[in-house]
Structures are given as structure tokens and as C-alpha cells.
Amino acid sequence: MPDAKLLEAFPTPAESPFVIEHVNEEFTSVCPVTGHPDFGAVAVVFQPKGAKTGGRCVELKSLKLYFQSFRNEGIYYEAVTNRIRDDLAALMKPDWLLVRTDWRGRGGIRSRVFATSGDVPAHWLK
Amino acid sequence: MPDAKLLEAFPTPAESPFVIEHVNEEFTSVCPVTGHPDFGAVAVVFQPKGAKTGGRCVELKSLKLYFQSFRNEGIYYEAVTNRIRDDLAALMKPDWLLVRTDWRGRGGIRSRVFATSGDVPAHWLK
Amino acid sequence: MPDAKLLEAFPTPAESPFVIEHVNEEFTSVCPVTGHPDFGAVAVVFQPKGAKTGGRCVELKSLKLYFQSFRNEGIYYEAVTNRIRDDLAALMKPDWLLVRTDWRGRGGIRSRVFATSGDVPAHWLK
Amino acid sequence: MPDAKLLEAFPTPAESPFVIEHVNEEFTSVCPVTGHPDFGAVAVVFQPKGAKTGGRCVELKSLKLYFQSFRNEGIYYEAVTNRIRDDLAALMKPDWLLVRTDWRGRGGIRSRVFATSGDVPAHWLK
Amino acid sequence: MPDAKLLEAFPTPAESPFVIEHVNEEFTSVCPVTGHPDFGAVAVVFQPKGAKTGGRCVELKSLKLYFQSFRNEGIYYEAVTNRIRDDLAALMKPDWLLVRTDWRGRGGIRSRVFATSGDVPAHWLK
Amino acid sequence: MPDAKLLEAFPTPAESPFVIEHVNEEFTSVCPVTGHPDFGAVAVVFQPKGAKTGGRCVELKSLKLYFQSFRNEGIYYEAVTNRIRDDLAALMKPDWLLVRTDWRGRGGIRSRVFATSGDVPAHWLK
Amino acid sequence: MPDAKLLEAFPTPAESPFVIEHVNEEFTSVCPVTGHPDFGAVAVVFQPKGAKTGGRCVELKSLKLYFQSFRNEGIYYEAVTNRIRDDLAALMKPDWLLVRTDWRGRGGIRSRVFATSGDVPAHWLK
Amino acid sequence: MPDAKLLEAFPTPAESPFVIEHVNEEFTSVCPVTGHPDFGAVAVVFQPKGAKTGGRCVELKSLKLYFQSFRNEGIYYEAVTNRIRDDLAALMKPDWLLVRTDWRGRGGIRSRVFATSGDVPAHWLK
Amino acid sequence: MPDAKLLEAFPTPAESPFVIEHVNEEFTSVCPVTGHPDFGAVAVVFQPKGAKTGGRCVELKSLKLYFQSFRNEGIYYEAVTNRIRDDLAALMKPDWLLVRTDWRGRGGIRSRVFATSGDVPAHWLK
Amino acid sequence: MPDAKLLEAFPTPAESPFVIEHVNEEFTSVCPVTGHPDFGAVAVVFQPKGAKTGGRCVELKSLKLYFQSFRNEGIYYEAVTNRIRDDLAALMKPDWLLVRTDWRGRGGIRSRVFATSGDVPAHWLK
């Protein structure tokens, strides 16, 4: 089941602001209604705080394990997206954070969900 | 025929604002003049109100059945788009809503129609 | 319902053999089990007999109307493909004929079906 | 020759503003200098006035016939674009209108021309 | 775990030979060494025997459930491919059968595996 | 109207066999039934005879003018293709010749036609 | 060598502002250090002044000849771009002008250069 | 190891501001944890100061050698990006500078990092 | 330096013949003349002998380490390809084996090299 | 002018047959009629003889310089292709050789020419 304790962070290497995007195209969870698997991609974009104010970045391997912990969880698209946003915002307390999920589709409809924390620049919101 | 009563909604799972996009690439209705079928894609993008103010999200399977109810309806591109906008705005009363239809073309001309409700961010309007 | 009587043919304009391919990317029928619509493409490739031996070509508008006659028919992928092959082979009695259907997918699986009449050259069989 | 009288319009179906884009990828006219044909695409994007203030939309088939009336006209890229803008603005008196032409190229140079009427939103201007 | 008993078949609808391809782009199993999930696509192509000789086709929904039964199985690429080939060949006894798996890659290397039964035409073998 | 006298040829520059392909993506003629323009591409592929046996190649500018002579001709897809094949075969008497036309589609159906002269290698026939 | 006298202009056909983009994908000059040829694309985008204030547009064939005059010139990427900007700004005195060059790359690095005159809208600057 | 002394600059050829983008798709360094190589692309975008105020541009071949000096260095994505930003900002003191790295992915996750100096226009920040 | 002892093999899991393709898009070595790095992709395709006759498959992680051992080797394209072919043929003694390298290009020329062992089916040779 | 003496060869590194393809996408010559430059790509594919029988491979940098020697030569597509074939066949005396040129097009027509020496496998001839 989803487990935020798998997530680890390291101190940001710079005082000046910069932006990181991680995209995992191999995300899978389970539809809580039908029990069939859902497949999609998850993108995480954020600007860590500066080093002097305790800025932190999520560690890549821990992020992978955290994503894998959703594998057998019955959970809706919207809840996946909001949960990842909440867990990563709590971990890093970044200047801003965007979580974007992109689902392969069911019944002929494909979906995307965008959840944010802080003031995400407009050019990232689509 | 198009039937808004097929649509169902569920309470938004979050208080903080987030955005959902559903795209159906298997939409078909009938041209009211020639009787030939039209084929296209319908995208719905919206930001539900927060949970405390009664925010609601359209349920995915009901959306699929609602789209299928246009299958044998004789109706123009513009009317399809405005009708879906009206039905979904009435169902969810979202912060904002965009309906974008993209038609495969007739007589060598392909068309898109954009109908909105509320203040849709500019980066979604194309 | 599918209606082969909609199909019309005209005499081939040449004695020397030639090949014609028609592709319709706007084909739709209905799944006989679930009642949900199926969407796909249908390709027809054939070599008419020469003019002196009564070669005939399917007329394009009649082919379109014939394809539209499947719109509300509950019918499997395999049956659609074999039926079109049978109807067009009976209409044209070509040297050879290939019908290839390409379906958008259900439950995460997309399918293609290839039905032939006569000796179709190998380079057309995929 | 280009004939604005071929254009027909119908009343907009909505009071709330919406946007329509028509793209014709089969446009052809003739170079007035060399007499050789030019090939390109024409896109028309506009926001009709609301219904209560007499908003009108161009009818699709009439637009196709109007575009075909340029087929044997000797006329420059810039003049084609400005003429279509003028004719459609006179027909519909829309809130705003963009005409964008995209030419396949001559002498290794391909060109685009953008003509506007009213205040076209920036996201449409490229 | 992989379960061939989930597979169902139905009688082929035609006496004349035809070919069916099913592609599932949402296949996942687990690496038996690292425990990390593998992601890939599985294609199944076959020619059923004719109806009079007991030809059978795999049923689409049962195929989907069968593929899902590999979800938490620790199994190598090569074994996945050979196992699916064996299970489907036993189920349908087709004229010929090809199973092609296409894996997203680990350590910078992506892989494909092709397993066959019977005399698969050369144009399908890549 | 189509005018084979526009075509010019020059002697092949080599005794050893070689192959030439010319593709024109800006072909247009007129549908003889509806009077609407058709748009498509025409490809010509051929192997001239060797120089000592009088091999000839079509001159590029004359080919362009010949294609333009179909601009206002009412003529079917099949007839266009066979006519170009006949005119070029008469002009060049090549070892072999293929004419392939690829039409943008009407009524949702796009078409290709392949006409040959002599023994065209199989890898060119699709 | 580059020769601005090859450039010709004609009066703008409209009082209302419009925008023209010309793209030449067949640009070549010579590296002044190594003597090897450079290959790239040059795009010119501009808004001519209105007709009453003497607006002018560059003539297409003269632009082609001007670009060809760089063919054997030893000149850096940056100098090419600034020179074209200067020559065209002097010729047309447009409201604004952008010259964008896009080079195929040397030593594994591909480059683009953007030079402007006047107030180029932001959506053109990338 | 990374060596900023490899970098060379030359005076900007223009007083008016312009923008240069260099993209190297053949960047490689080493993961400091696993010792396996990382592969990616590095883009550098900047606006040099005007010539009168001492504006300078990085020389292309020196940039290539500088990038190659990371080949056997164990260094994180974030550190690579910030280091290149620092070294180039120190070399050129440009009006603004963006370094964007795009990594091919490890463990199914691909990443991008954006580091800036000065006031980078918004259209470059994604 | 290239080290064939890094390669490991495991027994083929099947008696019936099957085919495996591994593609590594992150290959790098060094040009022996200039000392600059080369970048490319390496594909290995083979059919192992059956299990009873001692068929073996190369182990994926060992293949990755073997490829990495070329990282700082000065070696020509042709020698890389022939060496990998020789090392893998010696390791697995397969029914047949193809090694295909695809290089990103130097001086505007990109190259591919194909080396084989045994009787590789024609559809793999391009 | 084209200069075969620029070409250099080195002994093939292997006794067993293998295949090499070089593609130059930056080829330019001049049209002998109009004086305008032509742009295209040149591909060279060949199988050198084995080492014991004196097999030779063209050296990459010399090939680049040889291609550049056509830069200001007025020469037809067909002559370019046959000349390169003749020069490379004389240099290497390979088992077989294919030269394929692909031209960007003039007057709306793009062309390819294929010249061969020896018995080129069919899968390379398109």
C-alpha cells in the first residue's frame, strides 16, 4: 500500500532557485470499483527552497519505491494525485510543487489530473 | 438522444483546487442536414470547487454513457459543444469548465469548437 | 443493419492488372455482449479482373453507405471482417481481395483482423 | 474567381462567448507571376458575438465553396489572406477573427501569413 | 499467478483462413531477481484452423484476465513469452501462432522476444 | 486537360540499370460526378532501359507541367492512375514502371491506386 | 558573398497590421575557421508598417537569391543572423522583425540564434 | 574531471540584444552512487550583454570540450546542472542564462533540471 | 577496455526455437584518431540453440556491463561491431546472431554497421 | 568539382562478410540548367570483400570531403548518383554497393535515385 515513509530527501545543492521534473511512465494502481489495473504516468515538478532555508529534494530511488507501493492499492485517479502531492509537499516543503498524472484510458476516455502546492508558474500547468 | 440524467457526480476529494481533464476520442453523432455520421473527440477540463463548498466531479463511466447518448442524434458541432458545456456546468457547478470538440472533417475542412463556463486559464484555451 | 445491397460496382477501366486500396477510419459497430460501441478502421485492398473478363470495382460512395449500415449492429470483430470480405468478393469477383480491420481497443487490448479471398501478395498481409 | 457571395452565415446558437476554428488543408490558387499553382492550408478562427447582439457563424459548406472559388485566381499569399479576413469579417462581424494561411513553399521557402480583425487572444497568434 | 484456466475460446466463425492480432500494451510482471516490476507489451498473432476442423479463437476478455494474472509473478522475459505461447497453442491448436513481447527496458537496454508455434509467415517475424 | 505532349524525355545517362522515383504531393483534379476538387500525391517509379538500347528518363519540369494539366479535368482516381501509367510507358518504354496515387479522402474514405507496366520488383508494390 | 542589393520589397497590401513568416530550410554558408560547410534553416518573421505609412514586404524570390549569396561565405552563426536582421530591417523598416537561425550541428552540438528589431511579441521568441 | 578552464569566450558581435541556444545531445557523466554512466542532453540558452558593455559568447568547440570533461566524473544531475550554470555565468556574465539538462532515465524515471542566472524570459522556462 | 569475460549466459528455457533482441541506446566509445567520444546504439538479435543441444542466452546485466567496458576504448565503428559479434558468438554459439550498430554521426555523416554469424533471416538484415 | 582522388580506403577488418551504411544529409550541388542549388541526402551501402581477397572500406572523413567537392558543380540528380556509384565501386571493388540519393524537391516534386553495383540484396533496394 502507498507508504510515504519510503520517501527520502537530501539537502538542495544550491541557494539560487532551480526546478526539477521527474517523470515515471510505469505507474500502476488498481481501480477500486472493478479491481482491474490502471496504468499511467506520473510527473512531479518542484522548486526546492534555497539551501540556507533548509531546501530539500526527493531522492530518486526512494521516489521509485514509493511509486511502486501503489501497485496493488485500490485507489481513484484523483486520490492518487492528491496523495502524492500531499506526501511530497510534506517531505520537501518546496517553494512550489506540481503533480500531474496521465492515465491510459478506460472505456475510451483517457484522463489527466493536476494537483498543486504553492504558486506553480503558469507554463507548467498544462 | 442526449440525456443529461445519465450524468453522475461524486464529491471532490480535496479542499485545495486541482484540475481534471477527460478526453474521449470515440465521439460520434449525426449531421442534421445530410444524415451522415460525424466523428470527433471531446475534451472536458474543469476545476471543481473545494470540498467544503460542495465541489463535485463527474463520474467517469456516467460520462461515457452520456457521450454515447449522442450516437444517433442529428446535431451540429456548435450545438454539441454548447450542450455538453451546459449539462456539465449544471451538474458540477465548477470553478471553471472548458469543453473542446475536435472533428475529423467534412468536405476537406476539419473544425474545433471551444465553449467555456467561468474563468478558464488562458493556457487551456487552445 | 449491414446491407450488401447498398454496394454498387462499375467496370474496371483497364485490361492490365492494377490494385486499389480504400481505407475508412470512421467505422463503428456495437459489441454484441456489452452493447457499447466499437470504433475502428477498415481497409479494403483488391485487384480487379481485367476488363475483358468482366472485372469490376466497388463504387466509393456505395462503399461508404455500406460501412455506415453496420453502425447499430451488434457484431464481433471477426464477423465484421469476414462479412465485408464475403460481400465484396461476391460483388466484384476480384483476382484477389484483402479486408483488414483495426480496432481501437477495449480493456487495454487493441486488435486487428485480416480476411482474404484469392491469392493476396505477401507484402499486403501485415 | 473569389466570390464572397458564396458565403452564408447562421445565427450563433449561444449567448455566452465561444470559439470556432475551421481548417482547410486543400486550398489552392495560382501564382500571379509564374502561373503555377500554389498549395496551402487556410485556418479561420473566430469568436461570434452573442446571440442577442446578432452574432453569426459561417456555414461550413458555403465556406468550402468560397475557398474553392480561389482555384484558378492569380493572387499573392498576402492578398489571399487579407481578402479572406475582409470577407469573413464583413459576413459575421465577430468579436474577433484570425485568418492564418500556411503555404507548401516555392524555391525552398515556405511561408505563413496571419491577418486579424478585432482583439485576437495572444495564444492564437502563432 | 499465471493461470491458463482463465483462458476461454470460441469456435472460429469462418472456414477460410484468416489472421487475428491482439496487442496488450499494459502488461506487467515482476523481475525474479530484483523484485522490481517489469512493464511491456504483448502481441498475439494467430491463424485459427477452419471451422470444420474445430478451429478456435481466444476470447478477448479472458485473454485480458489471463494477462493480468502475471501481475505479481516473478518471471523472466523469456519465460513469459514461452509460457504464453504454450498456453495459447494448447488452447486453440491454431495453424500457427506468434507471441511477441516488447519490454520497456532496464539498465538502458530494451528487449523483445519472439516465440512461435507452427509455420508463421515471414512478414510477421519482426 | 491532360496533355501527354507536355512530357519530354532525355537519354538515360548509364548503361547499368538504376531506379528513379519522383513524388508530387501537390496533385489536384476534379471529381467528374460532384465537380469538387480532389487532392492527392502521385509517385512515379521506373527503371529506364540501358543507354545502348535507347533508354530514356522523363524530364522533371515537363513532368510537373504534365501533372498540372489535370488541374481542371473531371476524372476518376482509377483513370488518373492508368492514364499517367500509359503516357509515361509510351514516352520512356522503361524496363518497368509503377504509378502510385494517394488521395486525401472523401466521405471519410482515403484511397490509393497502383498501376504497373512491366515486371515491377515486389518491394515497390506497397 | 552576402549581397543586400539582391533584396527587393513591395508595398504592403493592407493598412491593418498583419504578420508574415518565411522559412528557408536549405540555407548553407561556410565555417570561417575550418572551411567546412554549415547547414541550417533561416526563419524571418515580421509585421510590416501599414500601407499609408509606407509599409513594405520583402519579395520572395529576391529573398531566396539573397539567402543563396551566403553559399560560399565564411561567416559565423551569430554574424549570419545579425546580418540578415540588419539587411531586412533596413529594407522594410517594419513594426518589428525576428530572424531565427537553426543549425544542424557540429561536434554533437546544434545551435539556434534569435536576433530581433523592434518589439517582437513574446509568443514568437522561441 | 569538469574543467571550467577549457571554456573560451569571444566578444558579442552586436550591440542589440540577441539570444543563443546550444544543445548537446551527447552528454554523459557517471552516477556517484552506482558507478553506472548517465546519459542526457544539455541545453544552454543565454542573452549576452551588448558589445559596448563587454558582452561575451561561449566558443562552440571549447563548450564541447568542457562538456566532454564530465565524462568520467561521478556527479548528480542537480550538481551537473548547477555547475554548468555557475561556470558559464562566470565566463560570460550574460544578461541572463538558462541551463536545462534532460536525462534518459534510471529505474523507469526520467528527469529534467533547470538552473538559471538573471531574469530568464518565461517562454524559455519549460 | 572491452572485456568478454564480463559476459555471462544462462541455459535457454525452451527446446523450440525463439528469437531475442536486445537494444542498448546508450553506447559510447572513443574515436581512435581524434580522441573524441562516439555515441550510438547497439542491437543484438539471436536465436539460441534448443535446450537439449546446450542452447544459451546472454544474461542482461552482464551484457550491460560488457557494453560499458567500451566506454574509454579507442576503437573504430567496424571493429566495435565485429568484436561484439565475435564475443557473443563465442559465448552462446547460437543458431544465428546479428549485431547492428547505429552511430549518431560525425562531420554530417551517420553510419550503421551490420555483422552476422550463421544464417540470419533476411527480414532482420536492415 | 567532384574529385574521386579525395577518396581513401582502408583494409576491411574482417574475413566474414558484413555491411556498412553511411548517410550524409547535408549534400548540395547546383542545377546545371537554372544555376540554383540542389539539396539532398546521399546514402552509401556496401559489403566489402573479405580481408584475404583485398576487401576495402571507404574512410569516413575522405568520404565527407569527396561529397563536399560537389558543392559548386552543375550536375543532374541522375549523374550525381551514377558518378558516386562509379567512384566508390572503383575505389573499393566491393561484393555489392548501393548509392541512394534523396532530393528535397523542386517545383513541388521530390525525387530519389538508386544506382547499384553487383548483387544488392532486395531489402536494401527501397
Image (tube, coloured by chain):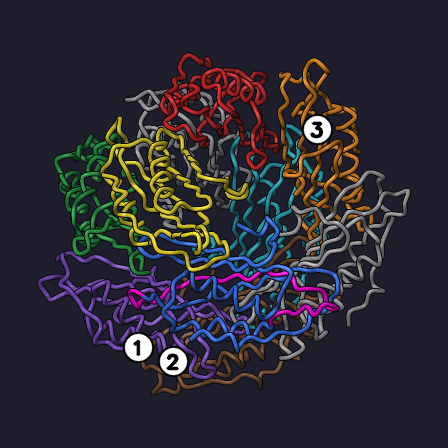
Chain colours: A red, B orange, C cyan, F brown, G blue, H yellow, I green, J purple
Q: Is residue C85 visible?
A: no
Residue A46's place in the image compared with I35, above or below, is above
Mark 1 belongs to chain: J
- The disc at residue B65 is 3
For the residue marked with disc 1, what is the amino acid?
Answer: Arg
Query: Which residue is label 1 attached to?
Result: J83
Q: Nearer the viewer, residue A65 or H115?
A: H115
Give the amino acid type for the residue marked by disc 2 in the picture.
Ile
- In the picture provided, is I18 more to the left or to the right than G92? left
Q: Is residue C9 above or below residue H41?
A: below
Label 2: chain letter? J
Give the spatial CA distance, label 1 vs label 3.
65 Å
Of tags 1 and 3, the one toward the viewer is: 1
Q: Is residue A47 magenta?
A: no
Q: Residue at x 25, y 64 (%)?
A: J46
Picture coordinates of residue C77 (x, y %)? 58, 39
Residue beneath disc 2: J75
**Magenta stretch in the rendered image:** G33-58
Instruction: Look at label 3 and name its amino acid.
Output: Leu
| 1 and 2 marks in contact (CB < 8 Å) | yes
Please name whichever residue, A15 or G81, is drawn nearer the observer in this view of the structure: A15
Identify the image quadrant of the N terminus of chain H: top left
